[in-house]
Image: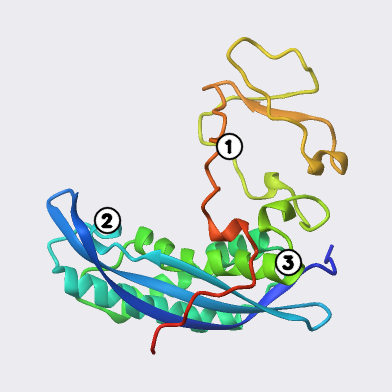
Amino acid sequence: MASNTDIRATAAKVYFLPVEMRVPLKFGPETVTSVTCARIRLRVKNQSGEIAEGWGETPLSAQWVWPSTLSYEARDAVLKDFTLRLASAWQTFDQSGHPMEIGHGFQEQVLPGILKAFNSAREGLEPMPWLGALVCCSAFDIALHDAYGVLHQKPVYETYNDHYMNRDLAHFLEPAPGSALLRTTSTNWPAGWRHPPASPMSASASSVAWVTQSTPRLQPSANAASSSRLATGSSSAPNEPAC
């Protein structure tokens, strides 16, 4: 069911920032000395017509996302071209919802088709891999979450609950092939298992918990998101580079 907190993307702009690295990095057979960062400004609108903008940025990292004998310059150019195509697709994608739902929908429904058409148009040339498409798309997804936090004037990580989301995490996850899952309401967990604490989502769903029998659940680091702009929901945008 739609919520009055839902948003959708309405406009996107792409900036490319060339970055020279202070220290070379080694990726497989390649040494990285420079990288292109894709910076995205994404505008969103809610059900009431209120508008906000968010920012996202990621290094395109051609050496990592596309191991190949092609030159770095050739792969970098393709990744930038694909990112520009994604901008058009994002601003016409009409799905509304929470950023988790919109980003998942775009990745499942739109991104594979764009990549297939893009590679088909480059007939006879080495196709860009799926990982490259995911990395190009990630900057838009970051900007989407940032804009959502700005619009609601909240740290975006505080919106991952049933007040803002229309679906819980079970909608986005599937068991890995061959994994063993246990459906239980018990609180007596076997040694070595860690049951996640109750979340705000659990109040609107059943108390049935899903846990894996294959490996212990790792506890997230306390510093995992401490430095992310995504978590701030800040309305202050970075300085725009010259187009």
Mark carried by residue 97: 3
102 or 156: which is nearer to us? Answer: 156
Give the crowd class for mark 3: few <14, some 14-19, many >=20 residues within 10 Å. Answer: many
The answer to whether 70 appears left or right of 84 in the picture is left
Q: Give SS at disc 3.
A: loop
Could you say where residue 208 lies in the image, as x and y percent from the top left? 80, 30
| 2 or 3: tag closer to the N-terminus | 2
Mark carried by residue 59: none
Label 2: which residue?
A: 64
According to the image, what is the colour scheme of the structure? rainbow
Give the crowd class for mark 1: few <14, some 14-19, many >=20 residues within 10 Å. Answer: few
Could you say where residue 89 lies in the image, as x and y percent from the top left? 52, 80
Under mark 2, the amino acid is Trp
224 or 161: which is nearer to us? Answer: 224
Select label 3 or label 1 by which is in front. 3
| 3 or 1: tag closer to the N-terminus | 3
Confirm whether residue 125 shows in the render: no
Label 1: which residue?
A: 175
Give the crowd class for mark 2: few <14, some 14-19, many >=20 residues within 10 Å. Answer: some
